[in-house]
């Protein structure tokens, strides 16, 4: 049974660059080493390296100006009604693209329902949010801006804010030249999507291994990779993103404890399909050592403990101490190179800019 | 009387680079123009340009590593008990070094007592905070970390957080090599001070004028500069920072309305000296068009209205429409060039890192 799922998902994994309208980008081939090994061959069947270049979108072609506008909007606290919260608040690029909260804290200090997923490499996910309710990053970007527990804004107010600043109006005109009214909530989301697509982290030790450098992983990391594949972790955490490409019940074999589940029915809320009860999108394990706490509820802070919980819940296999340590070492080797992002300088508010509302 | 204050403060202004242990840094001389004018001569007596290079400190010598560590700490949300608020939250380098709140919003969504002053060019202020209660930036940096309405942390917890991450320990060791125990709350503040000293904004149109380029200001901006000096605004807003170098009662001639005063006794709370009732440090007017709302209470959103309030309250002179517009145009010409700051990538939390506390 596990093997069957495995083979299906390997196939999915191999094609995962083609999901969500993302066009495959050039991958970097490591020419410094031509050593091959059975482990490398097996790994290449299960995973793909993070490409060196940000992917482009068929329905949202990127450009330098669009990415720059998207960066401004991603960091822009005035897109929230309080003018205190931006996309970056819960997806801090300095903190692995996430925050350090169990579940994110938003407007009026309210706690949201789920743990903030990393923005890094999120472009490679099959869909966005833990339950996949947004098909892509541009749909995702519209959610938190409007959620009452997050940025608590309305599309109308967000657009009014952007239109109140001539520099933003000019930038939208330049980026969306064919639009009669370029400053829209949709275009805001399109620009944010192209910026977020640049937030990819290639060149981890594991990526170098996948690109052919056998020496980039040490013995413990290789042992961890082998265990990760042999025990079936790769069933849900393969492909370019080591996850992010399908939904799975949590857990397949045994339910984790109630505190970790936090009463969350997951994808069932989106699809109402019986099989989707307690299902979640398998999160990417890229840069996972940077994004504690773990799971949709953020109830577990230790990566070691998380690996143990997953092997019990999803595989029904109790891993020994060495196997767990090896897997943690391997996961750490999948921490990539963060892009260099210069903090934006925003246009100044004007007399027409809506005032912050704290209540 | 006004002339007397004026001459005293001109003298103060000419020496303002020597305050707070800040050593004068090299200034950039514009050689492209040698045109002189009586207006330029008068301006040079009253103001000094922002230097091209960040100033250094006698008691806190700067270094590349110290600035880099200071940048990490300035942006570090884990220095707050909630792990949500950093120095940068209220001093956003993209928003003129401030926020857009009347008074800053902090821990548990509480509103603080005063408007957030800009961090840009704050190194040139005679002291820090609206009431000058911190003599320099390193003392200032310790305040908000501990304030219950801001970051709500303790020095012990901040140090425990930093010590829990080996990369921070290494950086502190490198930056403070003579210290047996380098990770301290004081050293944290020293590093932040050197980073904040790099947040200076030279090369405004007005700086170019002060450096000898007569053409860098247009006729309206020159008219504004002349009015600004003739009417006595320069009495409190001269020197390198166009303010920030002395305390003055608000107002000298007539008290502004109660909403603007917000019951704040200002520097009196610090000194208990009778003359200090309702006195505040004159804020810098550098980049003032970027940092609405205005005054210690943040009750006024329009710069034009603020100029009118100040002329009534401080000078007892009602300016006409043209004079106000000219001054606003001149102030806009004092918006400088923001430094390029790459957002830091923080060390990962470890099992020893204290968990965020939201209550």
Image: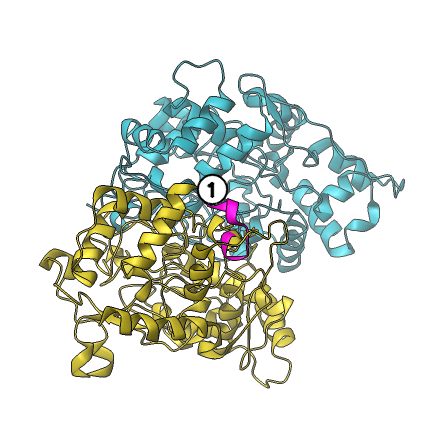
Chain colours: A cyan, B yellow
Q: Chain of mark 1?
A: A
Q: Residue at x 28, y 31 (%)?
A: A157
Q: On the rendered structure, is A320 left or right of A91?
A: right
Where disc 1 sits, the SS reads loop
Q: A153 or A262: which is nearer to us?
A: A153
Q: Is residue A24 magenta?
A: no
Report if residue A250 is visible in the image: no
Q: Position of residue A10 (x, y in %)?
A: 66, 28
Q: Residue at x 49, y 28 (%)?
A: A191
What residue would you read off at disc 1?
A117
Q: Position of residue A162 (x, y in %)?
A: 36, 32
Range drawn in magenta: B209-217
Q: Residue at x 59, y 69 (%)?
A: B66
Q: A119 or B335: which is nearer to us?
A: B335
Q: Position of residue B222 (x, y in %)?
A: 40, 48
Q: B218 or A105: which is nearer to us?
A: B218
Q: Position of residue A349 (x, y in %)?
A: 34, 41
Instruction: Give the vertical position of B186 relative to A186 (above or below).
Output: below
Q: On the rendered structure, is B270 left or right of A294?
A: left
Query: Split into 4 quadrants, where in the image is the N terminus of chain A?
Result: top right
Instruction: Give the vertical position of A106 relative to A152 (above or below).
Output: below
Q: On the rendered structure, is B123 left or right of A121?
A: left
Query: Split into 4 quadrants, where in the image is the C terminus of chain A?
Result: top left
Q: Residues within 10 Å of mark 1 (few under 14, many from 20)?
A: many
Q: Residue at x 50, y 60 (%)?
A: B49
Question: Image quarter for residue B112?
Answer: bottom left
């Amino acid at each position: 049974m596990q093997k069957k799922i495995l083979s299906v998902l390997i196939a999915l994994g191999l094609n995962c660059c083609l999901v969500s309208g993302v066009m495959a980008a050039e991958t970097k081939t490591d020419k410094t080493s031509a050593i091959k090994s059975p482990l490398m061959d097996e790994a290449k069947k299960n995973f793909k390296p993070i490409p060196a270049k940000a992917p482009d979108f068929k329905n949202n072609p990127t450009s330098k100006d669009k990415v720059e506008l998207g960066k401004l909007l991603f960091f822009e606290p005035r897109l929230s009604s309080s003018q205190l919260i931006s996309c970056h608040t819960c997806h801090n690029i300095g903190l692995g693209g996430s925050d350090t909260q169990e579940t994110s804290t938003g407007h009026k200090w309210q706690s949201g329902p789920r743990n903030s997923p990393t923005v890094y490499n999120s472009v490679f996910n099959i869909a966005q949010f833990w339950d996949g309710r947004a098909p892509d990053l541009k749909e995702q970007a519209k959610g938190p801006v409007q959620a009452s527990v997050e940025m608590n804004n309305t599309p109308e107010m967000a657009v009014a804010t952007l239109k109140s600043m001539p520099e933003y109006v000019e930038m939208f005109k330049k980026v969306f030249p064919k639009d009669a009214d370029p400053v829209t909530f949709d275009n805001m989301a399109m620009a944010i999507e192209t910026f977020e697509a640049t937030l990819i982290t290639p060149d981890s030790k594991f990526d170098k291994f996948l690109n052919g450098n056998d020496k980039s992983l040490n013995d413990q990391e290789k042992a961890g990779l082998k265990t990760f594949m042999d025990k079936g972790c790769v069933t849900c955490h393969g492909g370019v993103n080591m996850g992010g490409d399908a939904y799975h019940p949590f857990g397949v074999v045994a339910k984790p404890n109630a505190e970790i589940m936090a009463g969350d029915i997951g994808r069932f809320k989106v699809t109402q399909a019986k099989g989707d009860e307690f299902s979640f999108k398998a999160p990417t394990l890229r840069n996972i050592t940077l994004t504690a706490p773990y799971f949709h509820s953020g109830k577990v802070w230790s990566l070691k403990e998380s690996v143990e919980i997953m092997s019990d819940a999803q595989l029904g296999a109790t891993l020994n101490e060495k196997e767990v340590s090896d897997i943690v070492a391997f996961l750490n080797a999948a921490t990539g190179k963060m892009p260099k992002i210069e903090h934006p300088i925003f246009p100044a508010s004007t007399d027409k800019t809506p005032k912050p509302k704290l209540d």
